[in-house]
Image (tube, rainbow, N blue to C red):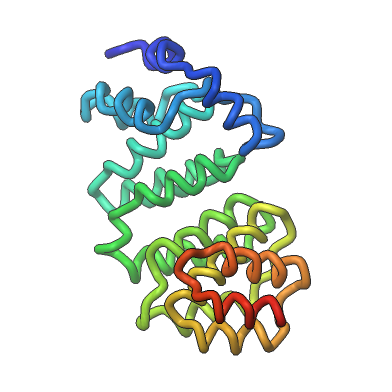
Amino acid sequence: MIDIRKELFSLKDEKYKEFQEKLLPGINNFIGVRMPDVRKVSKKIPAEYQIDYIKNYNCKYLEEYLIKGLFISNIKDINIILKFIEGFIKEIDNWEVCDLFVSSLKIINKNKALFFKFITQYFYSDKEFEKRFALVILLNYYICDDYIDRIFNILENIRCKYYYDKMAQAWLISNLYIQYKDRTLYYLNSYKLEKDVYNMSIRKIMDSNKVSKNDKELLRNI
């Protein structure tokens, strides 16, 4: 076993740490290690020790939480991974760990129905990053014909209270616009969103390179 913390500090990048400080205001438990290097460190841990890390390693730094998320995503047994995901969600306190963890959960692609049922509980959580976790899961894995009706039903029934869950909701809506433009426009024109989330959504759509100039002009007029 390598000394994970020592290994991470050996890869510390001061310029990247300064960059992270701007992206993660209020979060100060990061070392300043770029994600490719975090992945390299995680791959030095043999598979037989990864479960022990998940269960017993005392994570202090953001990069250590990222490694924990990577190890959880490596688990193939669906019942075991759901148990560990449920525990790990409670530890997430920033968007970077949340979003990178979600992006690593490729197991969802083969277990969509089961995971959709699992994340439903978090749409109505009053905790910022539990709700963000569920919304980012949707935008990564569920924007498709089979789930589009259920996604809009969720959007019509949830209320986000904090900045990072609101931003995830806006991000989801912007991705919906790219793939289901007419349906999303209809939803936006129904004015069921809180004003700040509505404006966030419009901005996120207009930031996308996949949206035409004409569509951006239309949204600007809205």
In the image, 213: left or right of 179?
A: right
One can see residue 121 in this view: no
In the image, 138: left or right of 50?
A: right
Residue at 61% in and 65% down:
170
Residue 45 found in image quarter: top left
Q: Nearer the viewer, residue 163 or 121?
A: 163
* Placement of the C terminus among the 4 image quadrants: bottom right
Residue 134 image point, x, y percent:
51, 60
* Placement of the N terminus among the 4 image quadrants: top left
In the image, 196: left or right of 106?
A: right
Q: Nearer the viewer, residue 217 or 2?
A: 217
Q: Is residue 146 above or below residue 137?
A: below
Residue 101 image point, x, y percent:
43, 45
Q: Nearer the viewer, residue 102 or 33?
A: 33
Residue 37 image point, x, y percent:
36, 26
Residue 217 found in image quarter: bottom right
Q: Is residue 46 above or below residue 105?
A: above
Q: Is residue 82 above or below residue 93?
A: below
In the image, 117: left or right of 159?
A: left
Residue at 56% in and 71% down:
173
Q: Residue furthest right?
A: 195
Residue 131 found in image quarter: bottom right
Residue 102 image point, x, y percent:
43, 51
Residue at 60% in and 50% down:
129
One can see residue 140 in this view: yes
Q: Nearer the viewer, residue 184 or 42?
A: 184
How many numbered marks does the figure carry? 0
Residue at 33% in and 67% down:
112
